[in-house]
C-alpha cells in the first residue's frame, strides 16, 4: 500500500497541502502507516466507507473540508460515492451549501479511492447530533431562508432515490402506528434533513443532497 505517501505530512493531493495533524478522525495525531492500514481495512468491508474526513488547508481556497472514500474497485460507486459530485452538478448555485472545489479518483491494486475537496463551513450546526435535545430559538429569517432553499432544491433534476414507497409502507406503521400514505407526487429533497446537517446562523445544507 502507498496510501501513506498521499496523506502524509506536507503531501499534496489534487492541489491541496494536507496537514497530517488535522486529518484522521480516530486519533488526534495522524500516523501515516496507521492511516494506510485503516484505509485498507475499511476498503475491504462491503460497500464504500468514509475513511477520512477532516479540515485541510489549500493554497488557493484556504480552509477546506477533505473527504476520502475507499472501497474495493468493484464496489466503488452508488449514492455514498457520487453524492457530493452529483449534488454539485444538479443543485442550483443559489442553494446555500459548501462549494465543491475538486474531486480526484485513483486506484491502488484492488481498491478505489476518491478524494473530495469542498469549502469549509465554520458556522456551528443547530445541534451536535440528529436528536434535538434542547429548544432552539431560530429567527423567522432562518426559516424563510431554509424554505427558499428547499423550494429551489425541489426543482432540481435528479435520478437519485433516497425514499421509496416500500420504505414508507414499512416505516410509517412501525413508528406511528398509523397506516402508510400512498405518495402520488415526488420531488427532489435533502436525503438527511436533520438539525445536525444545518447551520444555526443561516441554513447551510450539507453537500450530499439532492435525492428524491
Image: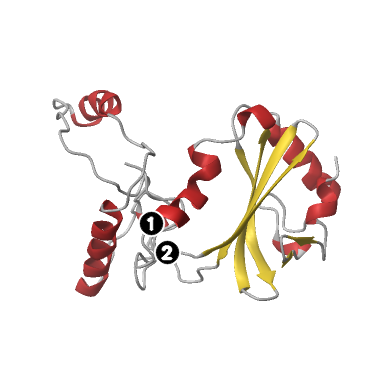
- Label 1 environment density (alpha carbons within 10 Å; few <14, some 14–19, many ≥20): many
Q: What secondary structure is marked by label 1?
A: loop
Query: Which is more toward the observer, 110 or 25?
Result: 110
**Where's residue 92, x and y in %?**
36, 61
- Label 2 environment density (alpha carbons within 10 Å; few <14, some 14–19, many ≥20): many
**Where's residue 184, x and y in %?**
15, 33
Disc 2 from disc 1: Cα separation: 9 Å
Query: Which is more toward the observer, 168 or 188?
Result: 188
Q: To which residue does mark 2 refer?
A: 97
> In the image, is 17 to the left or to the right of 141?
right
Decide: is 42 above or below 26. above
Q: What secondary structure is marked by label 2?
A: loop
**Where's residue 10, x and y in %?**
82, 66
Kindly indicate whether the residue at mark 1 contacts the one at mark 2 (C-beta within 8 angstroms).
yes
Query: Which is more toward the observer, 3 or 41?
Result: 3
**Where's residue 141, x and y in %?**
23, 74
Q: Which colour scheme is used?
A: secondary structure
As drawn, the label of residue 91 is 1
Decide: is 117 above or below 32. below
Query: Which is more toward the observer, 117 or 27?
Result: 117
Amino acid at each position: 500500500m502507498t496510501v501513506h505517501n498521499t496523506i502524509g505530512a506536507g503531501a499534496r493531493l489534487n492541489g491541496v497541502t494536507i496537514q497530517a495533524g488535522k486529518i484522521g478522525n480516530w486519533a488526534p495525531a495522524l500516523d501515516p502507516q496507521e492511516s494506510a492500514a485503516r484505509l485498507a481495512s475499511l476498503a475491504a468491508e462491503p460497500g464504500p466507507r468514509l475513511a477520512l474526513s477532516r479540515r485541510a488547508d489549500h493554497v488557493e481556497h484556504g480552509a477546506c473540508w477533505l473527504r476520502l472514500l475507499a472501497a474495493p474497485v468493484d464496489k466503488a460507486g452508488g449514492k455514498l460515492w457520487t453524492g457530493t459530485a452529483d449534488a454539485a452538478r444538479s443543485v442550483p448555485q443559489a442553494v446555500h451549501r459548501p462549494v465543491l472545489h475538486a474531486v480526484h479518483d485513483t486506484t491502488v491494486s484492488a481498491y478505489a479511492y476518491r478524494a473530495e475537496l469542498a469549502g469549509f463551513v465554520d458556522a456551528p450546526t443547530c445541534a451536535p447530533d440528529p436528536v434535538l435535545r434542547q429548544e432552539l430559538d431560530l429567527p423567522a429569517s432562518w426559516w424563510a431562508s431554509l424554505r427558499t432553499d428547499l423550494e429551489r432544491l425541489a426543482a432540481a433534476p435528479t435520478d437519485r432515490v433516497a425514499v421509496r414507497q416500500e420504505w414508507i409502507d414499512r416505516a410509517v406503521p412501525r413508528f406511528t402506528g398509523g397506516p402508510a400514505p400512498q405518495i402520488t407526487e415526488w420531488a427532489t429533497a435533502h436525503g438527511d434533513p436533520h438539525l445536525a446537517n444545518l447551520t444555526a446562523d443561516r441554513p447551510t445544507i450539507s453537500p450530499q443532497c439532492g435525492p428524491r
